[in-house]
Amino acid sequence: MIKTNLKVLMAQQDRTVTALANDIGVDRVTVSQWRSGTQLPSYENLNALCRVLGCQVGDILVYVPDSLKAESAETGE
């Protein structure tokens, strides 16, 4: 769930793993692990993700069906 939401949010903003890692202050490998689902962001890093990506915690943590994500990514909402 987190990995999918993070990928969608990053794609909507054309953010690379390296750019997001630099903006948050973590290693690129850390962001890659979040995106692959092998690690979860800490509370502090989750808040940093929200700040940098301009979203709410629920946008990262809450399950949204793939059909709605695709629609959101296409419309930019």
Image (cartoon, rainbow, N blue to C red):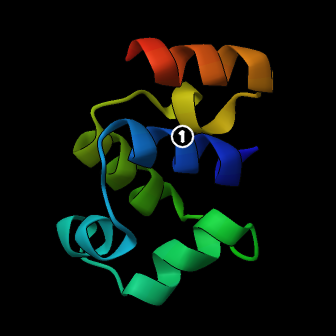
Q: Position of residue 42 (x, y in %)?
A: 54, 64
- Please report the residue visible at 43 percent of the width from the left and 27 percent of the height from the top: 56
Q: Is residue 7 visible?
A: yes
Looking at the rendered image, the quarter that the N terminus falls into is top right
Q: Position of residue 8 (x, y in %)?
A: 54, 40
Q: Position of residue 31 (x, y in %)?
A: 48, 73
- Please report the residue visible at 33 percent of the width from the left and 80 percent of the height from the top: 26
Q: Residue furthest left?
A: 23
Q: Is residue 40 visible?
A: no
Residue 9, above or below 69 = below
Q: Is residue 24 left or right of residue 5?
A: left
- Please report the residue visible at 50 percent of the width from the left and 56 percent of the height from the top: 43
Q: Is residue 52 left or right of residue 11?
A: left
SS type, badge 1: helix
Tell me the residue that label 1 is attached to: 8
Q: Position of residue 18 (x, y in %)?
A: 30, 77
State the residue in front, 76 or 57.
76
Mark 1: few, some, or many residues within 10 Å (few <14, many ≥20)?
some
- Please report the residue visible at 41 percent of the width from the left and 59 percent of the height from the top: 44
Q: Is residue 70 left or right of residue 9?
A: right
Residue 51, above or below 17 = above
Residue 71, above or below 10 = above
State the residue in front, 59 or 70.
70
Q: Is residue 20 left or right of residue 69?
A: left
Amino acid residing under circle 1: Val
Residue 28, above or below 3 = below
Looking at the rendered image, the quarter that the C terminus falls into is top left
Q: How many marks?
A: 1
